[in-house]
Amino acid sequence: MTIKESLDVLVQAIGSRVQAPGDCPMPIPGLGFYRRDQPAQPVVCMVEPCIVLVAQGEKRLWVGGEGYLYDTSRFLVTSLDMPANSEVIAASPEQPCLGLTFKLDLRILAELIAQSELPPTRDRAELKGVGIGAVTEGMLASFARLVALLDEPEAIPVLAPLIQREIHYRLLKSDQASRLRRICAVDGQGYRIAKAIDWLKLNYGATLRVDELAARVQMSAATFHHHFRQLTAMSPLQYQKWLRLNEARRLMLNEHQDVSGAAFKVGYESPSQFSREYARLFGVPPKRDIAALRGKAEVTDQLSDSRKKCSRSDAQTG
């Protein structure tokens, strides 16, 4: 299957299943589709260890002031949980930006590295948690086969794990292999930073003492701070603040917590400090931001309902 043929398969599959702008998880574990109908300014997001493909359109991820542009010929890969900003460059209602996200399983990567006798990289220039790689025929063909299983749901439990393993193998044969091998190397700095990030995600509300966290992952405080910033483009304290603010945003949006309640719940002692730092990250104060997000959600729901009604009407008249 050529690259164009695989992209056509993906465009058809994603476009038919995601008919309104948004992100949609699929029945295959770790697989998600997304659609954007117009260019958009960068929005705050957390990117898991994953590969992001664009089947149609163009996007850019901003990490620490550096932009990573990706499209149908270039894929995005992240090897850590990365606070970032996602921007839509090319999209329109007629030619929406369509793509998929595929969550990486670091255990599968480690197994494949061991079985294939692929040595960990020693290239220090690769010590970043995000990169752009060249799309290959083999990689796209494996994704096209995985997506095709959505039309054969009874086969997903049997065949999806095999294709998912193949996708991980294709990544380890790509130009981004060294980045992934570094994170999977148990004796490497990247692996230890990943463990520290896991701890921060579980304990974002606790008082952070960087020297204690460094000792927890068996690194000196100076080395830990240096490699943490290299991989995430943030200091450990900035990373924790990002986690706190985004969890507070979720609490206010989904659980209807007020500003003070959300601030205290994620570890802030001063609601005013929380509001200042929230506005610095999201561009507007908490109350205005949540009101705007709820308004957008209502518009999206109305658009989705309208499209469903139109689809039913077309089917009846057809």
Image (cartoon, rainbow, N blue to C red):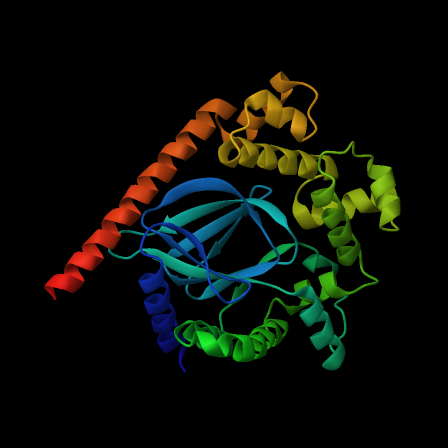
Residue 152 is situated, as x and y percent measured from the top left of the image, at 42, 77
Residue 17 is situated, as x and y percent measured from the top left of the image, at 35, 62
Q: Quadrant of the N terminus?
A: bottom left
Residue 48 is situated, as x and y percent measured from the top left of the image, at 60, 54
Left or right of 209 on screen, residue 263: left
Q: Could you say which quadrant of the image residue 265 lies in? A: top right
Residue 192 is situated, as x and y percent measured from the top left of the image, at 79, 54
Who is closer to the viewer here, 163 or 93?
Answer: 163
* Whether residue 285 can be seen here: no
For the point 33% across and 62% down, the residue is: 15
Furthest residue in direction left, as rendered: 317
Q: Could you say which quadrant of the image residue 275 lies in? A: top right
Q: Could you say which quadrant of the image residue 263 lies in? A: top right
Who is closer to the viewer here, 126 or 145?
Answer: 145
Left or right of 186 on screen, residue 76: left
Considering only vertical position in the picture, is 219 above or below 203? below
For the point 84% across and 62% down, the residue is: 187
Q: Quadrant of the C terminus?
A: bottom left
For the point 69% across and 44% down, the residue is: 201
